[in-house]
Amino acid sequence: MTAILQVADLKTSFRTDDGIVKAVDGVSFSVAKGQTLGIVGESGSGKSVTSLTIMGLNDKRAATSSGSVLLDGHEILGVSTSELQEIRGTRMAMIFQDPMTSLNPVKSIGWQLSEAVLVHKDVTKKAARDRAIELLEQVGIPNPERRVDDYAPQFSGGMRQRVMIAMALINNPDVLIADEPTTALDVTTQAQILRLMKRLQDEYNMAIIMITHDLGVIAEVADDVAVMYGGKVVEQATVAELFDSPQHPYTWGLLGSLPRLDSKADRLEQIPGQPPSLLRPPSGCAFHPRCEFAFNRCPTEVPPLVKFGGPTHLHRCLLGDDTRQEAWAKKKAAMKVEAAA
Amino acid sequence: MSDDLLVAEGVKKYFPITQGILLKHEVASVKAVDDVSFTVKRGETLGIVGESGCGKSTLARCLMRLLEPTGGKIVFDGRDITTLDRSEMRPLRREMMMVFQDPYASLNGRKRVGFIVGEPLDVHGIGTDQERKRRVQELLEIVGLNPEHYNRFPHEFSGGQRQRIGIARALAVNPKLIVCDEPVSALDVSVQAQILNLLKDLQREFGLTYVFIAHDLNVVRHISNRVMVMYLGKVQEVAGGEDLYKHPRHPYTGALLSAVPIPDPELGKRRQAIVLEGDVPSPINPPSACRFHPRCPRFHEGVCDVEEPLLRPFGAGHEAACHFPLERWPMTAEEIRNPTETVAR
């Protein structure tokens, strides 16, 4: 399995009036074709900026990036706008949280879908339109021949997200980046969209980067997971490893914060405090002010990414292995998750 | 003093759709809430859950008399409040407060926190300036904010802290009932957990009664004693939180439970799911009889689309409105499609 997208030591900072904001601070990961990488984190963790940097969509006047992004072995970080335009849409595509603001309300769906084809391929308008109808059918829009001439406001939220997916896939991209694609949707619609993405991933054999704040969504769709906090990946693992034996106290906090149907706990295992300011991040481990297991090294040392168990499981925590396992066992017991029937 | 703090009987809210400019006439109506009845006992939390457009927020506003219900009766603390006028409602507003979804939009950005939290005291003429200030600082402390931040503006606080301000404001006049409309859906997971814990602590400390509205079944089940499931303006099922999750009777409840992502990859792969197709139909022209029938895996022609199912008891305060209730849970797709028992009609 070779990686189609390899990100190494990616850093992005923004110049603001108040100082430099290090939104992404040394992020590395890779995704293979047909695989899904989940990136999970709260607001300000840097998960969206990571994806925008990969797509080259940051405002160039304010943002500076370094590191490397290899798409199929070719460096795409810092290449010219025209080269990026070649890549975006054909090799990599992106869908966003709010499908209403991502679609143009005064152009028909068919016009917008055809445009995506016509920009990149030398085909007739008729062929582009046929391709648009074909894609609408694939994403499960009923009566695609008729609905292709409709406008965005005539579709429901779930249907609009389907249109966005159709637009992203119209040129068979290798990588699809989905930034909170189901956050604005109702739960039954979310289930439909997640199933649709899974099916299309199998058909197109593409890599998906799924950005979300919802560990439940991660558990359903991801193969690998990166947990981000304060611009850094604090834990990285296969989905089974992450839910089986999470190693970072922040991951425990996220798991404990989730109210879940199969838990008997009366109180949630909350994380105290607020997410950190990226303008003035805490020294050492960014999570230490909120971490109940912090000790004297945490405020001074920046923890490196170290292996735990197998080669796929990495974390940034300074606690000793034994102490960490004990702490997790205690946390897990407090969550009172019922054994599966 | 009766055990029931809030009783709703057949509450309806129709929004008219009009045509014409000079000669306006009603052409149709949106039946946002249609014949909803329930009771909330003192000290309990009733959760109301449903997808967008199910009428849960409209219902909340009707309960508070922020919207005039089209029909039905609302009894608060033994008193029928459905027809009270503004001045008669005013003293009652002290006893029922509301917490809103968006902590950015529901606080006045030009006022200081002290003013925002103390405004209900001011409106109801409670205490002197000195007493009010002390009360506000006490409230800020109760909800976990620094009382010294009395003179700050809302924009100086994060989303979670703003929601705490909203809660402090609701607590200011010692209400009996707090209606929370999606109080945590705009917050990050870790902050959401803090607010849910805070709401539970406050309930214990002050004996509060909550009506808690949310679209997230996990959140509702965590905080509520009883949960009411709504779909297109109608109540589909009411049950104790535990009971609803273990033995859902309505196929729509089953579908909601199946759609909730479980933060456990093993469990997620094993579970059986009712997957719904399509979208929630328009409330302007809702499906006949059972409003869920066009999407229901248990749909029976000639029954579900002809006769409206009424809420029927299933023991221990559990009620569901379905002709072919689920026999057990979880079920395989096959079992879901082929009901073995029908409710005698």
Image (spheres, helix red, strand yellow):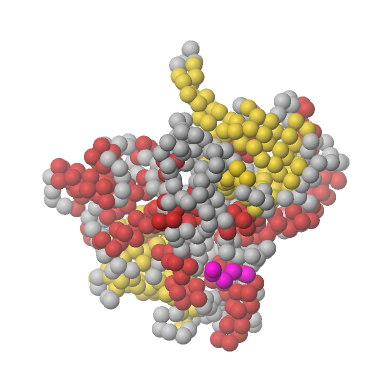
Residue drawn where x is 86% and y is 46% of the image? B131
B332 or A314, nearer to the observer:
B332
In the rendered image, which quarter contains the C terminus of chain A? Answer: bottom right
The quarter holding residue A180 reads bottom left
The quarter holding residue B123 reads top right
Residue drawn where x is 55% and y is 28% of the image? B14
Is B241 on the left or on the right of A97, as rendered? right
* B185 lies above or below A279: above
In the rendered image, which quarter contains the N terminus of chain A? Answer: bottom left
Residue B20 percent location from the top left of the image:
45, 16
Residue drawn where x is 70% and y is 48% of the image? B210
B75 or A20, nearer to the observer:
B75
Is B329 on the left or on the right of A114, as rendered? right
Please state the extent of the stretch shown in magenta in the rendering: A336-341
* B255 lies above or below B61: below
Per the picture, the main secondary structure of the magenta-coloured stretch is loop
Is A76 on the left or on the right of B279, as rendered? left
Residue B329 percent location from the top left of the image:
52, 58
Q: Is residue A340 magenta?
A: yes
Residue A180 seen in render: no
Residue drawn where x is 47% and y is 55% of the image? B259
